[in-house]
Amino acid sequence: MIIKETSKVEPRQWLAKLALTFSHNAYGTQLKTTSRKGPLSVQKAFYPEGQECAHIYLLHPPAGIVSGDELNVEINIEEQGHVLVTTPGANRFYRAREDLSIGETKQTQITSLHLTNEAVAENFPQETIVYEGADGFNTVDVHMCDNSTYFGWDITCLGLPSSNQYFDKGQYTQLNRLYCGGTLIYQDRIEISPKNQLLHHMAGLASKSVFGTFLIYAPLQLNELKQRKEIIEVLRDIIDAENAQELISITDIRGLFVIRYLGEQAHQCKNLFIKLWQHLRPLVIEASAIEPRIWHT
C-alpha cells in the first residue's frame, strides 16, 4: 500500500514593519534612524514650512492590505521634535480570501506613535477604503508625555457606494487609544459586522458609509476650561458656516478634543477636518497650518 504525502500549503501572508525615529537639534527635526522590513518605506523628510517640522510620506507600494497581511508602523519623536505624517494616497483593505487552506482572513494594520517631552506629532493619513468582504483591523496607539502635543485623524470609507459596491458583508474594526504619562485616557473602538448591524442601526452609523475621528490633545496650551469652551464655540461657528451641523460633532473630554464626522463623502470629511486644523494649529502650537504638498497632486 502506497501512502501519498500531502504537501503542506504555506500560508500566504506579507508582514511589513517600519520604525522611524526623529530627533531635534540646531538644524531642526531630523529623521535619525529608519528600520524597515517588507513593503513599507519613506523617501526622505520634506520641509515645506522650515526645518522645525518634518513632513513624512509613508509609502506602501502594494497600496492595499489583503488577507494574512500585517503592517506595523512605529514613529518615535524625541524631545522637541515635530513631525507631520501622511500618505500619498488612500489605504485599502481588499476583499478577504475565502480559501482558508492558504491562510487566515485577517488583515491588520497597527500604527503606534511615541512622543517624548515637548514633541509634536500630526498624524494625517488619507482615507482608508474598506472593500466589501474585507476582514480588517486598524489600530492607532498614541503614547504621549504630559507636555507633548498630538493632532491625528482617521477617515474610513465602507465600500464604494458611488460604484454600487456596498459594504453588505465583511467586517472591520477601528481602534484608537491615547495614553498620557503611561495612563490610558482615551479608547474608542468600533466594530462593524453583519452580526451587530452597526452600519445600519440608528444608534450606530445609520447607513452612512464614511466616518472619521479627529483627536487633538495639548494639555499645556488647552488646560484652561474657559479657554477650551471658547475654542469649541469658534470651531462650532466654522461648522455652522460650512452648513455641516449634521455631519460634525465636537466634544471636550478632559482636555482632549474629539471631533467626529458621519456622512457619505471622504473628501468632504477631509476638507472639514483641514478647516478645523487650520484654526486649531496656530492656537495650540503657534504655527500656521501648511498642507503637505502631496495632498495637491
Image: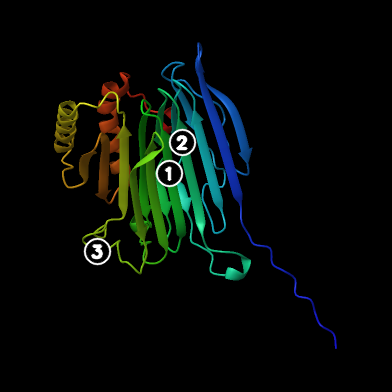
Looking at the image, tell me whether mark 1 or mark 2 is earlier in sequence order: 2
Tell me if mark 1 has few (under 14), some (14-19) or many (20+) residues whose alpha carbon lies within 10 angstroms of its own: some
Q: Residue furthest top?
A: 26
In 3D space, how far apart are the residues under numbered discs 3 and 2 (Cα atoms)? 33 Å
Residue to which mark 1 is pinned? 140
Residue 201: assigned label: 3
Residue 279 as seen in the image, left or right of residue 240? right
Residue to which mark 2 is pinned? 113
Identify residue type, mark 3: His
Identify residue type, mark 2: Leu
Q: Tell me what residue is drawn at x 20 percent, y 43 percent.
A: 249
Q: In this view of the protein, which residue sits in the foreground, 91 or 81?
A: 81
Tell me where residue 64 appears, x and y as whole percent.
51, 50
Residue 72 as seen in the image, left or right of residue 278? right
Residue 268 as seen in the image, left or right of residue 238? right
Q: Is residue 143 above or below residue 49?
A: below
Residue 102: assigned label: none
